[in-house]
Amino acid sequence: MTPTHWRMTTLTRAGLVTGGLALALIVLGLVLPAFASRKLIQDLFYILTMLTLAQLWNLLAGYGGLVSVGQQAFVGIGAYALFGGVILAGMDPLLALLLGGLAALVLAVPMAFFAFRLHGAYFAIGTWVMAEVARLSIAQWKALGGGTGTSLPRDATSGMKVLDWIGALFGVRAAAARDILAYWLALMLAVAVIGGIYWLLRNRLGLGLIAVRDNIEAARSVGVDVRRMKWAVFLLASAATGVTGALIFLQTARISPDAAFALTDWTAYVIFIVVIGGIGTIEGPILGVLVFFALRSLLADYGSWYLLTLGVIAIVVMLFAPRGLWGLISDRTGVQLFPVRRWLHGPGVGEETSR
Amino acid sequence: MIWLDTIAQGILLGGLYALFATGLSLVFGIMRLVNLAHGDLIVLAAYLILLVVTLLGLSPWLAVLVAAPVMFGLGWMLQRWVLNRVLGPDILPPLLVTFGLSIALQNALLEGFSADSRRIPNPALEGASVAVGPLNLGVMPLLTFGSAVAVILVLNRIIYATPLGRAFRATSDDPVTAGLMGIDPRRIFALATGLAMVVVTIAALYLGTRANFDPAIGPARLIYAFQAVIIGGLGSLWGTLIGGVILGVAQTTGAALNPEWQILAGHIAFLAVLLIRPRGLFPRAND
């Protein structure tokens, strides 16, 4: 019985099944535009982008302990960078998506510098103030329409070569081809973000994050650099949120400071998705976004009742099931679709020792 | 002379922000809870006063006396039945619950009172002003500032010179030990939130009589309150008043330069203080 026979793994049967299922879903998602209606593609675009934002907020709040209420800053700055790149510099819209991520990253540095001086709940409101500063400053940017906003020029959005190709492939007009392209990009972004977060959590940084979340003193005592970790998570999440924001507004092709920096759309909904689904898990936001979209479809005609219901559900969930719907399911069944827990396999016997 | 006037207006506006902030500061000081629905509760109180004024035909000043006990009860119940359940070492649950409450309240008000902006009628003093030296100061802004000072005097008196205040301070320092001395922290927390809601009602009176309000303006009031607290330094009510004044002066000065810069100037003043003195100008608490 030499120590070399021990090995650490995060592999579980449910994890393998999820992996297979996820691959199948991704392939299905890629070929879906061949037989799905345009409405379904648009709905899926919304679901996928909200899922991406929710996963990123969950990485911040659920794993990093950074409860940000200012995510709209990154959505907004990413979107405005895309518009600026396309309208003012004549960039290719797809390349400008990356510019959106870069702009969000650049904004995240001063934002973290200020916000990290505040702790806990004050951090939350601090990020919110910073998002307001970004919104009010962008509203002064007259070249992009100031407070009223602007639209992407038609030839910039429908002039992309790839659109002709999509149009020919599925036999659809330019407008529908644009939706399909946006949907594909959203699908790839969602897969990349979920995959990236999962990879992160199974690695050194993720282990450190979970250690900090569970017990900050213990984590420090074994050499986890809490400050560096928070910076890393904040910058990563900000850049990815910026790309997502750019993509969302590439699809709508119309922007205004109030829409791009909307607290309700890009932070409140996202928080509700994560809280209802289950904070601190990768499964939670996935479940949450489905519940959120179902509620939205059900209550679409009732205006403010919809948000009222969401708020009340979030309160009830926090009071009675603080780990969300996925927490309830996983407590009953013990299932983990995205296992991050490390198991130690003994030599020969194959018995498992938790963590 | 215009500058003197701008600064005087800013100082008086600071009184309103201090009123917004005092309730927030009180609750945070005693139970380390930041209520993200604070701004929306101010708006709720303003609607409550408006309702009393229109239904009972009372003057706004008397309507506050009716609304304040109701708000106290609401705050007490909110703390006792909801917030006490989520208080703990983890800051996430109370934050998310109050965020949910904020969104729910805004939309409930929207459903109940529509998006139209309203104002609490105050015919006697609306637009009234007095000449102070070279300046012409509004009576309502002066009353607002005076009320802020009075509220802080009374609260400091309660906190530092009554058995209730002793219980507040003891619970704030160490809830477990306070519990051993026969104080029920949950009861103390409920009383503190109730008291904060009385201050909120007073703030709402001035919010509602001085300008129009609608269900969506709560979050911005929360931000001003928060900025006043942070600029002043946690744990000091007089610091909060000065924080409010700095914010108010920054806003009126910004607005004097360009009307679009009013809010931005306040935010920038806040960030500047955060940069130079991360713990605020007059910090007392350690967290």
Image: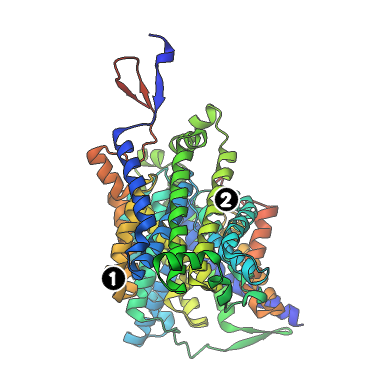
Residue A324 placed where, x, y %? 31, 49
Q: Residue at x 42, y 75 (%)?
A: B215
> In this orientation, which residue lies closer to the viewer: A44 or A266?
A44
In the picture, residue A215 is in which quadrant?
Answer: top left
- Report the amino acid beneath label 1: Leu
Mark 1 or 2, nearer chain start: 2
- Report the amino acid beneath label 2: Leu
Q: Secondary structure at mark 2?
A: loop
Q: Is residue B263 above or below residue A70?
A: below
* B281 displayed left or right of B128: right
Location of the N terminus of chain A by quadrant is: top left
Q: Residues within 10 Å of mark 2 (few under 14, many from 20)?
A: many
In the rendered image, the residue lying farthest to the top is A1
Question: Mark 2 — residue?
Answer: A118
Q: Residues within 10 Å of mark 1 (few under 14, many from 20)?
A: some
Cβ–Cβ below 8 Å for labels 1 and 2?
A: no
> In this orientation, which residue lies closer to the viewer: A170 or A206?
A170
Q: Which mark is residue A299?
A: 1
* A309 displayed left or right of B14: left
Chain for mark 1? A
Residue A135 seen: yes
Residue B36 placed where, x, y %? 45, 60
